[in-house]
Amino acid sequence: MSIRKNKTKEIIATRVRELRKQRRWTQAEFARRLGLSQSRLSEIERGAGSFTAEQFLTILSLFNVTVTDFAPELASDPEAELQKALTRLGATHLRENENVVPSEFYDDPGVVVRETLVVGSPRLLTALGPVLVLHVDHIQLRKLHARLAELGLERRLGWLIDNVLEAIRSELKHALPRLWTKRYRRAAIVLDTFLEYARASSPKQSNDAVGPDILDPSIRTKRTLEEVKAASSPISRRWNIVTGLQPEDFLHALGEARAGL
């Protein structure tokens, strides 16, 4: 067994023992809850064995903890967690990192969309296209808009949906499997209806008044800012979003994700 696996066993065993003692449970009592003998539990707590997957899930439930409470090294940065969540929600063109364990926080597609818009990574933003298409009926767009408005980032949602709609319309110009045609048409009607609301809530003159939203983290100088603004798409200019992303980037992400599903 590798040194890393031995270390993980030791961490889990130590943490379980601490949690058990905090609850003031004897080994015998805790063993009964897990459906194993006291002697076997004693071995595991000494690092001489491992819990089964079922037992480990029971432990998480009993103590109301998560995997990262036992293995802090699995607690990843927000962008890595978002990438994993996006992949699971349909952005199959992204590479899934098996060492990342996304928080339960990212089980909700609406939360994933919101947090991705806040982080602003161009690679992850385009991955929101397939997520919106596949989960459009499970995302409360007006609620999401209101939450982003609290952060002053609501224009990003309108900009995103504008781009995704253009990508969907481009996809629908081609012969597609019937399932994807239905998905795209459903997403288009829901997103277009919301877009009317978003445009009314953020008219262009208001967007211009509050100044540009500099989306790309790579923009660090005034010169770069002006260059990116000059090359911005009509959609980005409409929402006063400064980014190098183009509608074609969202179209490419849709096509890649569709091919992977």
Image: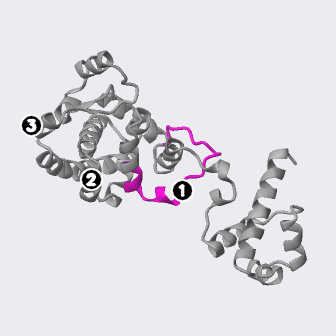
Q: Nearer the viewer, residue 177 or 152?
A: 152
Mark found first going from the N terminus, 2 or 3:
2
Q: Is residue 94 magenta?
A: yes
Neighbours of disc 3 within 10 Å: few (<14), some (14-19), many (20+)? few
Neighbours of disc 1 within 10 Å: few (<14), some (14-19), many (20+)? some
> How far apart in space, not on screen, are marks 2 and 3 (Cα)?
20 Å
- Tell me, yes or no, whether the two marked residues, 2 and 3, touch with CB atoms within 8 Å: no
Residue 107 position in % (x across, y down) = 47, 59
Foreground: disc 2 or disc 3: 2
> How far apart in space, not on screen, are marks 2 and 1 (Cα)?
23 Å
Identify residue type, mark 3: Gln
Up/down of 177 relative to 231, above or below? below
Picture residue at 80% right of the left edge, 46% below the top: 4
Picture residue at 48% right of the left edge, 46% below the top: 82
Per the image, the residue denoted by label 1 is 103
Q: Nearer the viewer, residue 35 or 219?
A: 219
Image: magenta residue range: 92-113
Residue 179 appears in view: no
Picture residue at 90% right of the left edge, 62% below the top: 48
Per the image, the residue denoted by label 3 is 205
Residue 209 position in % (x across, y down) = 12, 36
Q: How is the image coloured?
A: one colour
Per the image, the residue denoted by label 2 is 150
Up/down of 61 relative to 235, above or below? below
Q: Is residue 145 left or right of residue 53?
A: left
SS at circle 3: helix
Mark found first going from the N terminus, 1 or 3:
1
Q: Nearer the viewer, residue 171 or 69?
A: 69
Identify residue type, mark 1: Ser
> How far apart in space, not on screen, are marks 1 and 3 (Cα)?
39 Å
